[in-house]
Image (spheres, rainbow, N blue to C red):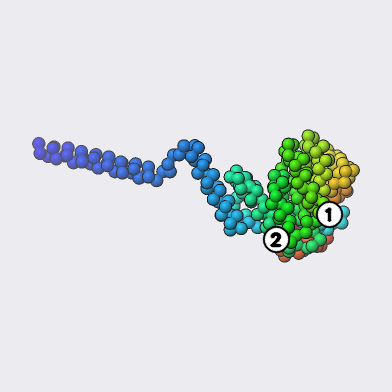
Amino acid sequence: MPERALLEYLLEARRSDANTAETIESVRQMRLAPPVLPPKLAEQLDAIRSASRISALLENHMLMTAFQPIYGLEGKAVVGVEALSRFVSDDGATAELWFAEAEAVGLGANLEFSALGSAAAAARDLPGSLYVSLNISPTSCMDPRLPELFEHIELPIDRVVLELTEDIPEEEYLQFISALNPLREKGLRIAVDDTHTGAGALSRMIHLRPDFLKVGRNVIGDVDKDGVQRALAACLVDFTDQIGITLVAEGIETVGELKVLTELGISAGQGYLLGRPSVRPEDWANWNTRLDVDGLERHLASPGE
């Protein structure tokens, strides 16, 4: 029958059109989907992207320096600052992520020295009586660019404290000391923190004789409530007093902690309670005033007043 033949023809044409549309959509999706790369090639491409990103940051100076005040706890006055890098980026990546990414592609030292230069330049707006603590890895301490840096910056070397961000590898310890000795003779000071001074490192720390030992929340947290924490802090005060090291408590968060740390004789402290990091020179200029602990306590008790 002609009608039946026509109907079968139309149905077949419709199925053919559907298959064609499905094929076209599949091809379109394949074009949109990213290619699946072999793992090794994907890693290489990621490294190239990271290196390009870090290089652009360095070339365009897309970092700035924030300073956080460090108070002498006995005199309640700012005695120094810690320089902290802040990066200009759309993704809001932290400084730790930037430095880790730079290290992974062999640009870690370049980024460190860029940060050091930025901090030294920003320090021109600080009160001249304050020391400036600069974070640096032991590897960069042995880099020939370090003594060259001090020849070109305006920040006097006797106002600089190099704060080590990592452990010193045991096999590099003598080289590290040898590299820094000429700078220390000119007034450079060294700080280490308690995360890099485990039992195996204490004897090496004594040989290094850092000028500052920084202790964090693992030591000072709830020191006003926990007897064990208080005893540990007291032992560190006694230890550092006997070998001539300035003890700095970082991460002070409450007035109770501040009062106990002061009573124990800890020399200096920093933390959000005392002052947050700031990139604003107008904030830095105000760090020549004394800390009013009683006023701070009243403000925290009645923040709306």
Residue 283 is marked as: none
Q: Residues within 10 Å of mark 1 (few under 14, many from 20)?
A: many
| Marks 2 and 1, the one that precedes in the sequence | 1
Which residue is pictured at 27% across the width and 42% down the height? 20
Q: Is residue 19 left or right of residue 86?
A: left
Question: Could you say which quadrant of the image residue 33 lies in?
Answer: top left
Q: Secondary structure at mark 2?
A: helix
Amino acid type assigned to the residue bearing label 1 in the image? Gly
- What residue is pinned by disc 2? 121
Residue 117 position within the rendered picture, expressed as x and y whole percent measured from the top left? 68, 57
Instruction: Say which residue appears at 51% left-offset and 42% top-offset.
Output: 44
Return the mark for residue 72.
1
Q: CA distance from mark 2 to mark 1?
A: 24 Å
Say if 139 sits above or below 132 in the image. above
Do the CB atoms of the residues marked 2 and 1 lie less than 8 Å apart? no
Which of the two discs, 2 and 1, sits closer to the camera? 2
